[in-house]
Amino acid sequence: MNKIQNLIPILDWLPKYKRSQLFGDILAGITVGIVLIPQGIAYALIAGLPPIYGLYAALMPQLVYAVFGSSRQVAIGPVAMDSLIVATGVSTLALAGSESYIAISILLALLVGSIQFAMGVFQLGFVVNFLSRPVITGFTSAVALIIGLNQFRNLFGVDFVQSDQIHVLLQDISTRIGELHVPTTVIGLVACGIIVFFRRLNRKIPNALIVVVFGIVTVRYFGANWEGIAIVKEIPSGLPGFAMPVIDIALIRELMPIALTLVMVGYLETISIGKTLESKQDEYRIRPNQELIALGLSNIVGSLFKAYPSASSFSRSAINAESGGKTGIAALTAAILVVLTLLFLTPVFYHLPKTVLASIIVVAVFNLINVKEARRLWRADNLDFWLLLATFLATLFLGIEYGIITGVGLSLVLLIFRTSRPYVTELGKVPESDFFRNKNRFKEVILEPEILVFRFDAQLFYANASYFRDRLDEMVLDKGKQLQLIVLDAESINRVDSSGVEMLKDRIRYYRKRGVTFYFAGVKGPVRDALFRGGLLEEVSLDHFFMRANGAVLFFKTGDNINQRKYAQYIHQAYQ
């Protein structure tokens, strides 16, 4: 039964559902639904799709995730970032809003969902670790800026160019800003002000609904005096019907780069939001691979009911938690609200100005520009700051796909750099104790000219074996001709490969010829296994291994140590 509950988490929490949770879940679901409906319409416009497809994306994916998601508070549906990525990728293949464009967007959802599902089944959730926090921050901030600038066409009523490259956007905006439509601009900026005001007053207030009502009332009853305001107009009523997306292998090949981008971004969004919400409660735990399966099924089933790619929403998930949502009942409630809207309320949105939708998007995405994190990294870690900045600039000027490729590439380069040049230091003995500590941090430690105790703070493998050798040789050179003993404090080494073993064997031979003995201290069992399999015992005996650096030094000085004899005997028995 536990295995089935792991695969279908709703079977775990639903039987334990408490009546006391119902009011909070329903209230949260209604609040999220009220925010979701105008956001869904707005985000569909970002994606280059008719408004109704935003509501389709808000329906089935949300229901499926409520069943299969390991998080009970994450809100799934259309989001700004994924919508812009869809627009960026699909617009090169078809005209925005056309039947072909819609069909490709739905096929993209099926492709994204299939990849996510396969990654979850094959336990590939660890892939997300290659995108570090600075990369995510830089990418998210850049995409938020691009999304916001792309909405200026609706906010100001000017047909600005649409692009995922900031210099293209800024050039067009700067040359045509004088063409802004005054009534559209006034309504849009007032809507922005209302949203900002209510966000600061209380985030639980449905500011999106307030500005939607404001926009509809303004245009419906006072719009006769203001010509040229773009409105949503007719949105079809009715639920989406079941339809299999048209499978085109050649088209799938062209969509693969944008699909992989959506897979990574959607998964990152869900995991980051889910982990944040998880930390605030103790009822459930996020399981990354299950999240991939849930996202995959959400997009697969969604594509069968005319949804474009969906993911988790930062804002709606936060609203859900803040409003008292504890389980998937909140998501089911929000979905019911979407159903009622599709069946009965779409005519209400006829007079909704597009500039109001743009104001909802602009305020939402500009809050994702994380200047505070950049400042923190500048103070805490310069390398991470430059990684953030490089990802940010690459996304802004090269486009979304190249931005995320740049971020992943630089993350890997930085990972290799840091693992190939780990921290290495000489240790000295703390006076009147058995402890050895870093000489650079503890100035009072005793350093003996005939003994070198050094620590290597990383796994020892092919990428840093040469660095290990070079730093060791430098320390030996600094010690001078009096040196008689080298002790490697290996407590921080958690893995060693064949290249590392061969390098150690080489150094042991090299220093033995020069009359210097080589000891090991604090070697972990798995590391010791690897050393012995690699033939290290051909160069040193078992009594060259010690539990602590202090034991190695004592044994060298006295030539005898009861604890060392016991430890050597223990190792000998373990490897018989």
Image (spheres, rainbow, N blue to C red):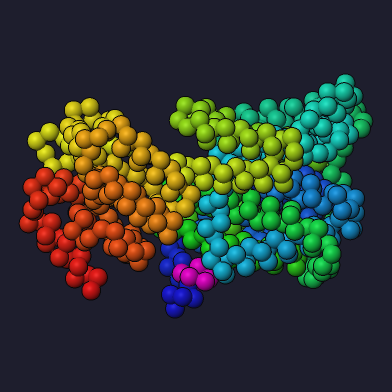
The x, y position of residue 3, in whole percent, is 46, 75
* In the depicted structure, whether residue 396 falls above or below residue 540: above
The x, y position of residue 237, in whole percent, is 82, 58
Residue 374 placement: quadrant = top right
* In the depicted structure, whether residue 150 falls above or below residue 316: above
Taking depth in this image into account, of 513 and 483 the one nearest to the observer is 513
Residue 568 placement: quadrant = bottom left
Left or right: 230 with respect to 33? right
Residue 184 counted in the magenta span? no
Residue found 89% across the figure and 53% down from its top = 94
Magenta span covers which residues?
6-12
Specify whether residue 476 is in view. yes
Total numbered labels: 0
The x, y position of residue 541, in whole percent, is 22, 60
* In the depicted structure, whether residue 325 falls above or below residue 184: below
Left or right: 177 with respect to 479? right
Taking depth in this image into account, of 410 and 37 the one nearest to the observer is 410
Q: Which image quadrant: the C terminus?
A: bottom left
Specify whether residue 223 is in view. no
Residue found 76% across the figure and 32% down from its top = 166
Residue found 63% across the figure and 53% down from its top = 264
Taking depth in this image into account, of 294 and 37 the one nearest to the observer is 294
Left or right: 280 with respect to 147? left
